[in-house]
Amino acid sequence: MRCLNLSLAIAGVLALPATALAAPAGGATDLDQVVVTANRTAVSVNDLLTPVEVLDRADIERSQARDLNDLLRGRAGITIANQGGAGKLTTLFLRGSESDHVLVLVDGIRIGSPTSGLAALQDLPLELIDRIEIVRGPRSSLYGADAIGGVIQVFTRREQQGFAPRVHVGGGSDGTIEYGSGFGGRGGRGWFGADYSFRKTQGINACRGAGFPVFAGCFTDEPDRDGYESHALSLRGGVEINEQWSIEGQALRAEGQNEYDGSFGNYSETVQQVIGGKVDWRPSEAVHVQLTAGRNVDSSDNYLVNGLVGPANTTSRARVGHFDTDRDSATLQADFTLAEGHLLTAGFDWLRDRLDSDTSYDETDRDNKAGFVQYQGRFGNQSFEASVRRDDNEQFGGHTTGGAAWGLNFAESWRVTVGYGTAFKAPTFNELYFPFFGNAHLKPEESKTWEVGLAYRGDGFNARIDGFDTRVDELITFDSAINLPNNIERARMRGAEIGIDTSFAGWTLAASASYLDTENRVGFFRGNDLPRRAKHSARIDLDRAFGKFRIGATAVGYGSRYDDVANTVRVGGYGTMDLRAEYAFSDSLSLQARVANVFDREYETVSYYNQPGREWFLTLRYAPKP
């Protein structure tokens, strides 16, 4: 039955009636108006040679998603693995790459833990986010290490002309309470904004058991609710000093309290903080220079909490670990317009990772310096881009990556693209130095990727299909011969993604489906699938407005996956359906209602870790037009 739900979801994408695809003008998104930064420069998404998906503030609010996990699941090329609901560890696999092979940026600042290599997606509140760009494919030649599978860029709220206050309050299943407020505006040469967001939920029972005798699960039986609480604040502002100079800055801080199931720890207090600023200089129409700098703090205090029986009705809390990492970065970039349609970009990057922990590491800091050059050009109906980057890592020495892509527009509405790129990933501090589990002799992972795409952009109908083949050498994985991580494997990830964006008979439709084939290519597990990647996935978002009333639905389906390298633990496929409705009392005030997982499907994305059943939410929003 779980696989049937996936089949129905994919069939719904591929079996749309011909009348639906012949949409009227103005139905689908006008891609010429969507500007992205996938190439480190502002470019119309329609001019990009790289597949990019953009989710703006209107998309986020219309979906009524509760967190990034909820918003991103099922989208083309993305597999999500979550360990037990809201606030729990969430990892993202893009195009079959490892979960630490995706670079995450917040307002252009690199985030992520140098110890685990992961970005804490579960701690980035949606209410503070203005836009998300999902860039698929290798981008190391522009951004450096980690971007083997792609880049996810998160932009916090941005302000419109005038003053705009906003408030939201809501609640729902599992004792969920949410509220927040903010304001922002532009006046003269300046702009400013601030937003606060609070979320608290009792959660679900995160883990269903110890998993013995199989090496899985959380190794304890704690059949209780595992709650989550988050406080987040975003501040930003900027000023245009004159026609040539401008300066801006932003800060985001999210503090979380997370309960989970575990034998060594079951409670954590986390901090995710991003502070950054940018100075812009435009001495002429042909030259644009930017200096960007920032810091990401990823901090976690972990505890083991046990209940005590007695009149005091208290609990004991023992601290079992502290990890505090800082990631400082700076970029100097210059863009030169050589002629109309020809842009040359050159820049320098600096990055420093630092670790403070009560766990002893042999090394606790390292830096990386890099220079990069990129050319983007248009020649009639053809486009070309090429980039090269040289990284000098304090631990691993020099590393050169490059990329090139070519595109051809034909028959007015069609475009074909071909691309090639290399990328690399430096080992994390945990992989290198964690006591008794690290291997200081590890080498960086390296990849090569070929891509081909075909896109159609018509009157009210957009479609794209992309294929890719990625091969990773020196893949880091656990080596049972030495009981440590080791560079013992090669892997191949190949697949295809299809996306459709259209409107018909008053409905708007966004649909995607993905096929992924992964393979471990050497060693004892040669020929096995890489763990936690689903071969098939699909998502459909369907919405329609009836005057002041709007309804919508989201269907997500995933095929089965394996949870381990040996492919002995299978996680079944599943499909879910969410329904939503919204009523606008006025241009400023609206009430949203959502029922998630309508059919109360039981499923897992990581073996032994539960996912929420049927849930409901109500949200009241007030946001006057500026």
Image (cartoon, rainbow, N blue to C red):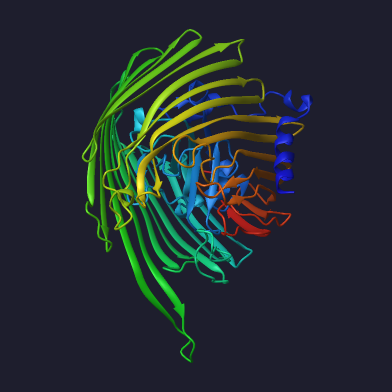
Q: Evaluate whether residue 41 shows in this view.
A: no
Q: How many marks?
A: 0
Q: Residue 152's spot in the image, x, y percent?
A: 45, 39
| 399 horizontally vs 132: left or right | left
Seen at 49% across and 52% down, the residue is: 90
Q: Residue 212's spot in the image, x, y percent?
A: 54, 64
Q: Evaluate whether residue 341 shows in this view.
A: yes
| 100 horizontally vs 220: left or right | left
Q: Quadrant of residue 404?
A: top left
Which residue is at the front of the view, 19 or 76? 76
Seen at 55% across and 46% down, the residue is: 567
Q: Residue 608's spot in the image, x, y percent?
A: 57, 59
Which residue is at the front of the view, 343 or 3? 3
Which residue is at the front of the view, 257 or 341? 257
Q: In the picture shown, does residue 257 fall above or below 56? A: below
Q: Residue 420's spot in the image, x, y percent?
A: 43, 22
